[in-house]
């Protein structure tokens, strides 16, 4: 067991040159674009749809998490190490961390312990500039909108009160949530209300995640819905001729990034965190890239399976024709204690009764995955405070409902602690392969799609639509957006829209407050409860404890 | 003469791999950090102060420019090609373009015609992410300030009305000039006025340009002056423990970038545009890097010599111990016609009388350079509308005052059009070498330093200080910042603070409206007239005419 911090473990690793990692994927060094010695971009021509179809996709998701998270990224990386240990050629395909939370409470997202992707500092900071490119593309559109409001010659007559498009910044900055802009007189534009969301919440991020090519990206950018004219006509980004300039800003961001795991296996990292408010998985391009170059691809979807996995399956897999052959459900004893009624202070105190009681949360997630015609494997992400009895209970209880549960020790032991899980996953992929079945068809009516998710995945008995949501439904119909996918915005803390209902709540109703439109991404976004698109910093920001010495060695980054 | 656009010329060029360009500088490929195949970062350990001292620094500046600019970057690149043509080992060291103006009127800043640095698209867009890193470091400090205002446990008691630190974004976006933030209730912070400047106007950019090492960078970041507490105590970035996190964000941005010219000579591009509001030259680190690796370094300073060159000499060269051996003053016949009274519509109409009359502007710049004990060479940047008589007059008139003027045809012919200028520069460097003498000593009193620049460089008869400026002077004294350099903010269109006074105005007074402080950069910034820190977009933004095809080929970018 290690007492080193994540960054100390990562820094102690002697990294392989990225061209050697590319070679493991049979990619020539001339085909990659290096960003320093340990990062590279992969060109889109390496995607091979035929190869991608024949390789094996494994999705890692989790039970309903505690605020600290249950280690999906760590498990995804560790499982990839484990698969390689038992002789499979496997690549992990992950989402990119957002910079904002690195200086807040959450920290980065490059795994932990002996299951990390490296160089973790770069991955958690600017990486290869993708988030910056997304931010600039988003904010160019904002500048073009406000410039048009001010224009005498090309004015589109946009009603400033109807503008839905917000600016973004990859920073935890609560004071930018609600602002007024254009103050100070005629030279400074038209005064109006605006606000900044955090960059991963940008529709440009969603579009990048859904795009299948540069031309598709451009078309989607042009389809972004901005608001209405004073004559109530919809206005799109293409009306401002913005799509090409935005695509130019994204010309490198569309290419997936290659790095390595601590055990020198390939890791592709590209796009998409924040599954509570966005689709929360890496880009379609990255997943297909991994599947084109590797026999096994391990990927993850954010938060609990009711959010990330539901979206990965119904939105991404259905749209892109992906067929996940196995779903790994990450559970921790700590989270099971939580769902069994443990107060926060006792998360790390062994309590078999609470684990037994909390199992119902995991069981509902297992049932949900089976609704997609996929066989789950449960990974019990090991903590030092776990007891044998607690772990034994989970394994036996899962077995009793026909699901294999395996102790996963990637954090402490890297790939050596993950060979059992790897074997269980290979067993499902090779012997229990299924044909994945989405829960709903995009072409179904909007209300039917929303109700299907709420009832079958969340376990709600009914869905209420507030007046605003009903108006939004009519607008969606008028604009012809009925065939879009449903991208739910809901708390990650409960199956329901009430974060206090832990475990497996029953008999509850969810309320759709309002429904947003991301026309470029082709998402309809029902908002359940109050969702925050811009986090704040804590009383003591993580930045205060970060240091960099005169040789550039960083500490305090997690 | 070419009828191709700049981007077409640049795209037609088959680029050399950046490791081959590094080799020309005797830098091994293992020592560079590649960003794709045609860009790289140079590590700071390649700087060798001894070598740097023995090599030759040439500064390119200009007469008072017209709004379109007179081609300093084009001349700097062309001169570098010319020097290499005549057997000198020369590198051009330039500033990085700002992204905002690329979508506005001005376009990028990578030279023009057959004197360009490439890949021009990348250089003009995100390049290696330096501006993004500067933006994030700046805005992290903003978020920490607003978070502290909101904090119950660590509140520094900052008076929000005194906060001088603004947010930045690399976008032409007038509607962000003046905003109110923190609206929407207690969860969203403390309401206050704020605004966004364009990123190159950030003090973080100035600090990066002045820093000599990572430890120096950190110290300067900590010294940023933010505002006052309610008890009137000054507050610095170090009081928020921000300097290490900011330096972490800048750990790669501090390294200069290597690219190539169209003739495959090395180009180092790093930091610093906007000499009207900032110091407007590349970083000290980049200039020293060039001088460590190359016998000749050609560099430029923004706008006219009264702004960029004055700052390059008094601020940068004095601080960093640089000794520019020759100054190239770029003049165009077009600009001379302008200073001789030509209306804008007749800039391209030959008119010897106007050129004769406009020469007085160039003559004043020549005299100014000589005050620094440096011998200037005049480069007449050739335009197709120039006549032999006009060019002949400038060359003869310069000769009559002991200065060599040379026709520079870099735009049309690349290095082949610049060998005469190169020979003239080598003659000065080898035979008329001087020891550069700054105009003022940093340790002189603030008012004396300001008056020296205004009277000796601008030709003013007096300097008026508005009441606000007088208050600012007392604040500077109280805070102990008297020994800082003077970084004037003044219109680039005139020697005076009135942009209408073209040519060589005389008998005028300049007015210091207010004086800002950049304590981390060690700059005192007198504001002469109304200076804009955030440009707007034009009625038809350049973005509207940009396209990117399905293969990623861009057009309409300039």
Image: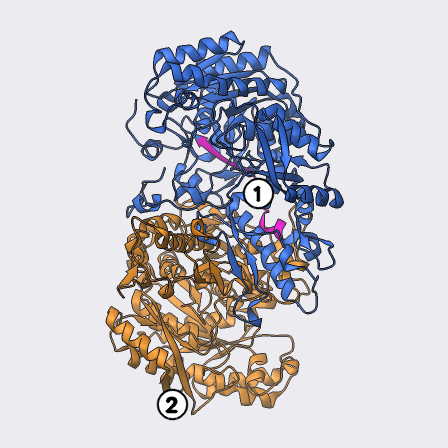
Chain colours: A orange, B blue
Quadrant location, the C terminus of chain A: bottom right
Q: Nearer the viewer, residue B512 or A91?
A: B512
Estimate the x, y position of residue B507 in percent, counting from the top left. 57, 24
Number of labelled discs? Answer: 2
Q: Give the numbered dot on residue A468.
A: none
In the picture, residue B526 is in which quadrant? Answer: top right
Estimate the x, y position of residue B365 in percent, counting from the top left. 54, 21
How would you rate the neighbour count of disc 2 (Cα within 10 Å): few for under 14, some for 14-19, many for 20 or more? some
Q: Which residues are magenta?
A: B246-260
Quadrant location, the N terminus of chain A: bottom right
Estimate the x, y position of residue B33 in percent, counting from the top left. 52, 41
Q: Are marks 2 and 1 on the same chain?
A: no
Q: Nearer the viewer, residue B329 or A88?
A: B329
Q: Chain of mark 2?
A: A
- Between marks 2 and 1, how big is the CA–CA gap? 57 Å
Estimate the x, y position of residue A184 in percent, counting from the top left. 48, 53
- Farthest-out residue, bottom: A507
B411 inside magenta stretch: no
How would you rate the neighbour count of disc 1 (Cα within 10 Å): few for under 14, some for 14-19, many for 20 or more? many
Position above or below: B315 against B136: above
Q: Residue at x 42, y 54 (%)?
A: A139
Position above or below: A18 against A269: above
- In the picture, measured across the screen, residue B184 lies left or right of residue B525, that is left
Residue A439 visible somewhere in the drawing: no
Badge 2 marks a residue whose secondary structure is: loop
Badge 1 marks a residue whose secondary structure is: helix
Q: Chain of mark 1?
A: B
Residue A395 visible somewhere in the drawing: yes
Position above or below: A192 against B280: below
Question: Can you identify the residue that label 1 sits on?
Answer: B205
Q: Give the numbered dot on residue A461.
A: 2
Nearer to us of marks 2 and 1 is 1
């Amino acid at each position: 067991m290690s007492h080193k911090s994540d960054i100390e473990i990562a820094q102690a690793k002697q990294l392989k040159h990225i061209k050697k990692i590319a070679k493991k994927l049979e990619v020539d060094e001339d085909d990659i674009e290096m960003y320093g010695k340990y990062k590279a971009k992969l060109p889109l021509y390496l995607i091979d749809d035929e190869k991608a179809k024949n390789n094996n996709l494994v999705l890692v998701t989790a039970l309903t998490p505690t605020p600290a998270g249950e280690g999906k990224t760590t498990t995804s990386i560790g499982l990839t190490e484990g698969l390689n240990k038992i002789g499979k050629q496997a690549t992990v395909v992950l989402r990119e961390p957002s910079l904002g939370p690195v200086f807040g409470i959450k920290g980065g997202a490059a795994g932990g312990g002996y299951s990390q992707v490296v160089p973790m500092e770069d991955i958690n900071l600017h990486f290869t500039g993708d988030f910056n490119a997304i931010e600039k593309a988003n904010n160019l559109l904002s500048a073009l909108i406000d410039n048009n409001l001010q224009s005498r010659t090309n004015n589109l007559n946009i009603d400033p009160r109807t503008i839905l498009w917000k600016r973004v910044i990859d920073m935890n900055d609560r004071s930018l949530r609600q602002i007024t802009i254009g103050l100070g007189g005629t030279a400074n534009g038209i005064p109006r209300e605006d606000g900044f969301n955090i960059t991963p919440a940008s529709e440009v991020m969603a579009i990048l995640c859904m795009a299948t090519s540069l031309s598709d990206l451009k078309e989607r950018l042009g389809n972004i819905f901005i608001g209405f004219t004073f004559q109530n006509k919809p206005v799109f980004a293409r009306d401002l001729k913005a799509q090409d300039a935005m695509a130019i800003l994204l010309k490198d961001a569309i290419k997936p990034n290659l790095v390595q795991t601590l055990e020198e296996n390939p890791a592709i990292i590209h796009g998409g965190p924040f599954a509570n408010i966005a689709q929360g998985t890496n880009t379609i391009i990255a997943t297909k890239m991994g599947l084109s170059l590797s026999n096994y691809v391990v990927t993850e979807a954010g938060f609990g399976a009711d959010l990330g996995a539901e979206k990965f399956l119904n939105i991404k897999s259905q749209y892109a024709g992906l067929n996940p052959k196995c779903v790994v459900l990450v559970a921790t004893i700590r989270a099971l204690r939580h769902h069994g009624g443990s107060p926060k202070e006792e998360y790390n105190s062994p309590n078999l009764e609470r684990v037994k009681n909390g199992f119902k949360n995991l069981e509902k997630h297992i049932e949900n995955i089976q609704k997609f015609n996929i066989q789950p494997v449960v990974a019990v992400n090991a903590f030092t405070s776990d007891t044998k009895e607690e772990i034994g209970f989970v394994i036996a209880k899962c077995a009793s409902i026909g699901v294999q549960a395996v102790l996963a020790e990637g954090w402490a032991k890297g790939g050596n602690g993950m060979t059992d899980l790897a074997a269980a996953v290979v067993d499902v992929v090779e012997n229990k392969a299924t044909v994945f079945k989405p829960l709903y068809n995009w072409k179904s009516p909007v209300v039917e799609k929303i109700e299907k998710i709420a009832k079958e995945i969340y376990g709600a008995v009914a869905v209420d639509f507030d007046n605003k949501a009903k108006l939004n439904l009519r607008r969606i119909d008028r604009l012809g957006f009925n065939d879009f996918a449903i991208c739910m915005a809901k708390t990650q803390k409960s199956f329901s829209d009430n974060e206090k209902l832990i475990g497996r709540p029953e008999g509850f109703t969810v309320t759709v407050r309002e429904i947003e439109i991301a026309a470029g991404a082709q998402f309809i976004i029902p908002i359940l409860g109050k969702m925050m698109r811009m986090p704040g910093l804590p009383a003591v920001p993580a930045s205060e404890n970060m240091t960099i010495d005169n040789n550039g060695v960083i500490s305090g980054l997690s």
